[in-house]
Amino acid sequence: LLHLPFRFAIMLFLLLVIAVLGLSLWTSGWKRSRALETMRGSVQGDWFFGITLTAAVLLILLQAFASAWLSCPNADDSFYVSLINTTLDSKAMFSFDPGTGNPEFAMTPQYACQTWEVLQAVWAKLFAIQPAALAHTVLPFVLIVISYCSYASLARLLVPGRYVPAFLVLLSVFHVMGGVTVYSQGSFLLLRMWQGKAVFLHILMPFLWASMLCHLKDSRANRHIVAILLASIAGTALH
């Protein structure tokens, strides 16, 4: 099953998009979030909220632009970006080790189901973007913005609404100053955000924590169970 043609991944991606959109509409019922409305009402006319929100937006956009503009290739490119390329150009997925480019070398078993790279190959095909440009320019900008949205969804459950932007400002400073090692949170966010493990750390984990906290506060809401299930499946796929 791992050696299916790439067109199978494209069809599966489109079906999953339709399914997730359907689940989202079913669980939300086209209604606005009551928590968002409550927060909006509590911060209206609050100068502290306005200043910190402006600072948070500017810092997030600065990080996103810097990561996209000042791309930092590393040794992982020789495998992961090559895997995107071989997925696009080969007759079957995972048919050989992309690090060598030699069909005589079989794929290492632990990397025989890299679904995140296959998803990037789907995006590269659908939007006609070169894999290296997608990984180092397009995805870092988009994913960094999404990651802070995920952190904001967690922050609104931990601090009062007027302090959510301040939380994001402090988190931004922590990330910007956290590049002391390749294993730090800041390094994963700003230098390696296109990799599956960084997506798991900075998007799925905050979202999963937020969904679990929401479920603990209101266990009768089925939409939280759906969110937890989808996040868990996505986390498994990002391995």
Image (spheres, rainbow, N blue to C red):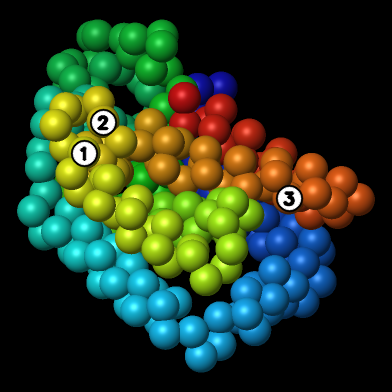
Which of the two discs, 3 and 2, labels the residue nearer the N terminus? Answer: 2
**2 and 1 marks in contact (CB < 8 Å):** yes
Q: Secondary structure at mark 3?
A: helix
Residue occupying the point 16% across, 37% down? 179
Q: Position of residue 158 (x, y in %)?
A: 59, 51
- Where residue 150 appears, x then y in whole percent? 50, 54
What amino acid is labelled 1 in the image? Gly
Q: Residue furthest bottom?
A: 45
The residue to which callout 2 is attached is 184
Secondary structure found at label 2: loop
Determine whether 52 is above or below 180 in the image: below
Query: Is 184 above or below relative to 218?
Result: above
**142 relative to 65 in the view: left or right:** right
Say which amino acid is labelled 3: Cys
Is there any visible trace of residue 130 in the rendered image? no
Tag shown at residue 178: 1
Q: Which quadrant would residue 172 be assigned to in this image? A: bottom left
Q: CA distance from mark 2 to mark 1?
A: 6 Å
Q: Give the position of the N terminus as an image quadrant.
A: top right
Nearest to N terminus: mark 3 or mark 1: 1
Q: Position of residue 46 (x, y in %)?
A: 49, 84
Residue at 56 percent across and 28 percent down: it is 236
The residue carrying mark 3 is: 214
Residue in the foreground of this view, choosing between 211 and 54: 54
Crowding near pointer 1: few (<14 within 10 Å), some, many (20+)? Answer: some
| Residue closest to the eye, 33 or 137 | 33
Q: Amino acid at mark 2?
A: Ser
Residue 156's x, y, as percent?
Answer: 58, 59
Element class at badge 1: loop
Q: CA distance from mark 3 to mark 1?
A: 29 Å
